[in-house]
Amino acid sequence: MKEVRKNHESFSFLMIVVIMGLIITAAIGCSSSNDNEDENPKPIISEINPLDKSLSDSGALTLSGVVKGELTQKTAELRFRLQGAEFTQSASDISLTINGSVVSPKSLSLTATEIVATVEFYDGRNDLSFKAYDTIGRPLFLTETVWSGSNTLSVNVLDPNGAPFLEPVTVDLTLSDDENIGASGNTSTGNLTFQNIPSRTVVVEARTYNNLVGVSGCVGSDGTITIRIVDFAPVSPVANNDFSLGLDGWNVGASPVTIIEHIEDFPAFSEKTSNNMIVKSNEESIYRSTREMRTASFADNDLQLATSGEGPQSLSRTFATSTGTTSVAVRYRFVTSEVPGGYFGSEYNDYFSVSLRSKAGGEIKSESNTMNGLGLGDFDFASGSTSWRNVTLKTDPKGDVIQLDVTVANVADALYDSYVVIDFIEERQDKVQPALSWNSVAGGLNLTYTVEGTTALEKAVTIEVYWASGSTYASQIGSPFFTYTVPAGTNVGQGGPISIPGTGLADDPSGTTHIIAATSETKIGVLPDVQISYGANANAASVSAGMIDVIKDGLRAAGQPTCTITSTARTPADQARAMFNNLVNSANPIATNVTNQLALYAAPGDAVINVFSSQTTGMTYSQIIAASATIQASMVTEINAQGPQNVSRHCADPAAASVIDIGVSSFNADNGQLFRASVTPRVTRFIDETTSNSCYHIELNL
């Protein structure tokens, strides 16, 4: 928020002015009351540059015409609405790009508070970038990602016998490239149609009210996909969740299934999987100890389900849980030859689905994903394998029937096979439910827990707190950064809070989006990591990764879940435009505007204002507006000559310094100070402008 301003130049000078003012006031008080008052008093100059008055933290600039999380039609009308200010009315001041391509100004229509653009989206991902200006000259920014397509996909839902499924069913379509994008619908006719599908791999799941499911995948341009509803198969009496008896008790049909020797880690996972085996429960400490006990008595086997030709291959396992089991988990990995084959990111986007469902509990948990959807970083490139993954399902502790359904499919051709490798299914008994919350008074996190059931804990239970890349147990990253042991004998009910100091939350690994506290895969407490949003005047692209890291660490230290960056870097052209708009403010004569602006800036800013004055001498207001481009170009030249950062700190080169303002409205009296204490030692300059501009001004030299 800080401009380089005259009224910050000298404390001594200020004291002299104050003393002289007191003397003059006393003298005036002693003069005759018949003295005439000044008929032309000097204007009261605000100490806040209008450029530094940011719009509201959220909702000032909004976009309609697309719906977050939904697929969008190829041709759309986008409406950018502005509250608290007005847009400038020149199309040349507006920049709208889609995937870097400029949308023609002829496609835009403007009013004071709304800009409407008729656009044609690409098939697939569309990254929108919008920039405009308000009448003061403040830049306005908005970015959004939209998925679009022109394909229509007809979904045929069949019963186990191949006839149309005529009972109510919910059908969910998920885009493989982004699992947050999709569509949903209901049908009782066995058919449903989805629109606006891109020519990318989609996974479609159908589910009934009584937990019958079907899943398949295709490319959006295929036109039709068939989903076969799968009923619960008869319960197998064979205890073979670990393949110690080969394929006994598994329903594999004609699918290409083999028993293979277990391989725990591939080289790319040697570091990150050294800890991902830690899966604590009340009765058993870790998966690794379970595996060691098993391998001591028999060969350590895995099941491998392979593709064969284009399309899906499937298997299932149906079994009954023992009394007291509160959850079951399946451990598996996805392997595809497409990755070492060099086809990652292509249309040959093979997919898999792993689903657990409960007959008595009525629950279902699954992961359906694709090669591209997972991302190349999830694979060991040499083998094409992911690390081990988990799907975990809550079950009825009185006893339940569980069915595991697994599918893997070649997409777009029959080449380069893919596989799902299953390690084992495990039954668990869990009693401790953890929870996390931010502590906005003392900073950091509060950890609480609930001992469930009717009796006290028989054994101690360890709660582990992880950084995570998502909201599931399988998304944990590395080792736990905090542990707490609930002692044996702890009674049923709630416990805590246990404080996790904010000063210890600065080492979040790359990819962190959540924090998870867990005693097992089903007993987890999930908390979104701190989040930074951007106001209408803030350009996210100009904020450095180092600044983001500092701010997020400060938020965690303060126990503050969110903040809004209200202002960022300005280009010299942005600064010149804003100064020009302030100088031609129609509410005052030009001369008054010049006087007002000279009072706000130090010598470098005054030099820019003087360029305006020299360029406009003898011109009428209309002539000045007509010559605005030429005048602003001269002002930009002077800004560059003076050094942009000397005119305004927000004009520092983003490659050399990251400069931001953060709105203080989210903070309270306690955690605002904690935030400042955390951030100040790590940045170049921290200025508390709470009283003057309702923000923290932060600079970080790069």
Image (spheres, rainbow, N blue to C red):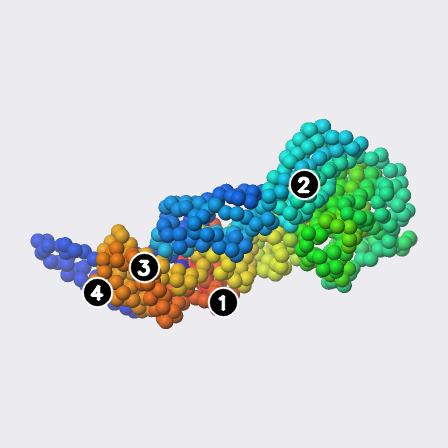
Q: Which of 141 and 359 is in front in this view?
A: 141
Q: Which of 615 and 237 is in front in this view?
A: 615
Residue 504 in sight here? no
- The amino acid at mark 1 is Ala
Nearer the observer: mark 3 or 2; the answer is 2
Whole-Å distance between the Cαs marked 1 and 4? 45 Å
What residue is disc 2 on? 223
What residue is disc 1 on? 655
Q: Are marks 2 and 4 in contact (CB under 8 Å)?
A: no
Nearer the observer: mark 2 or 4; the answer is 2
- The amino acid at mark 3 is Ser
- The amino acid at mark 4 is Met
* Image quadrant where one finds the N terminus: bottom left
For mark 4, give the secondary structure.
helix
**Horizontally, is 134 left or right of 25 in the view?**
right
Q: Are marks 1 and 4 in contact (CB under 8 Å)?
A: no
For mark 3, give the secondary structure.
helix
Q: How crowded is mark 4: few (under 14 residues within 10 Å), some or many (20 or more)?
A: few
Q: In this view, does 431 lie above or below 103?
A: above
Q: Compare marks 3 and 4 and give the one earlier in the sequence.
A: 4
Residue 628 in sight here? yes
Nearer the observer: mark 1 or 2; the answer is 2
Q: Residues within 10 Å of mark 1 (few under 14, many from 20)?
A: few
Whole-Å distance between the Cαs marked 3 and 2? 54 Å
Q: Do the residues labelled 3 and 4 touch (CB within 8 Å)?
A: no
Residue at 35% x, 58% y is 578
Give coordinates of residue 351: x percent, y percent.
73, 48
What residue is disc 4 on? 20
Q: Compare marks 1 and 3 and give the one earlier in the sequence.
A: 3
Q: Do the residues labelled 1 and 2 touch (CB within 8 Å)?
A: no
Whole-Å distance between the Cαs marked 3 and 4? 42 Å
Q: In this view, does 396 lie above or below 667?
A: above
